[in-house]
Amino acid sequence: MSNTLISELLHGTPALHVSMQASDWLNLLLHYMMLSLLSVGGAISTLPDMHRYLVTRQHWLSDAQFNASIALAQAAPGPNILFVALMGWNIGMNTGSSWNALLGMSVAMCGILIPSTTLTYVAANWGHRNRELRSVRAFKLGMAPIVVGLLLATGWIMAAAHHVASKDWPLWLLTAVCGLLVWRTRLHLLWLLALGAILGWFGLV
């Protein structure tokens, strides 16, 4: 991640110039509410559709902002759902208004949290009472491959932001090494994130 991009995210320099009307904020809220009900593997499993909507369709975020929001939220302490807040913040900052940044953050977080939290509470109580039912056990088994597929699609979206070219070989090598370390060792993921941040700071990847 470049120093310029980090500066943009932390200090609010807009990478895009967008105009948001009341209907746009409402559409953002409704879209996140819909994604909230689909986030069976966690909010990060809905990243492909977030990218399609925010970057490809609406052009409210750049690819760099989208990926950096995820990277910063994953590296920071606390729940990784914070990447949704960062996306909303960046949408608001791209309008050139700090108040819109707060609005964007609030809209995105309310949209992603309220439906899934409500549904989880109701479904968990019902599922616990009926955990021996064949339909409940079948549902749990059927959702597993869907979650795996969504996570694979998320990884593909994030990797596609970098073109496969000879100059990108250090990045792909680092990705492969980190993947092997996560798979074969007990090394904490935060150490790998720190290593990636250091290499990115010095422009090595």
Image (cartoon, grey):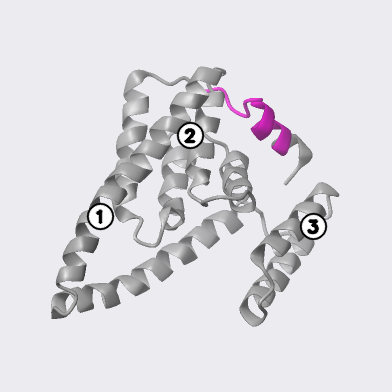
Q: How many marks?
A: 3
Q: Secondary structure at mark 2?
A: helix
Measuring 47% from the left and 32% from the top, which residue is drawn there? 105
Instruction: State if disc 2 and disc 3 touch (CB < 8 Å).
Output: no
* Disc number placed over residue 88 in the picture, else none: 2
Q: Which residues are magenta?
A: 6-18
For label 1, count other residues whose C-alpha is less than 10 Å away and answer few (under 14), some (14-19) or many (20+).
few
Name the kind of residue labelled 1 in the image: Tyr
- Residue with the mark numbered 3: 167
Q: Is residue 142 above or below residue 64?
A: below
Image quadrant where one finds the C terminus: bottom right
Q: Secondary structure at mark 3?
A: helix
Q: Is residue 125 above or below residue 85?
A: below
Residue 32 seen: no
* Disc number placed over residue 121 in the picture, else none: 1
Measuring 72% from the left and 63% from the top, which residue is drawn there? 191
Q: Is residue 13 above or below residue 149?
A: above
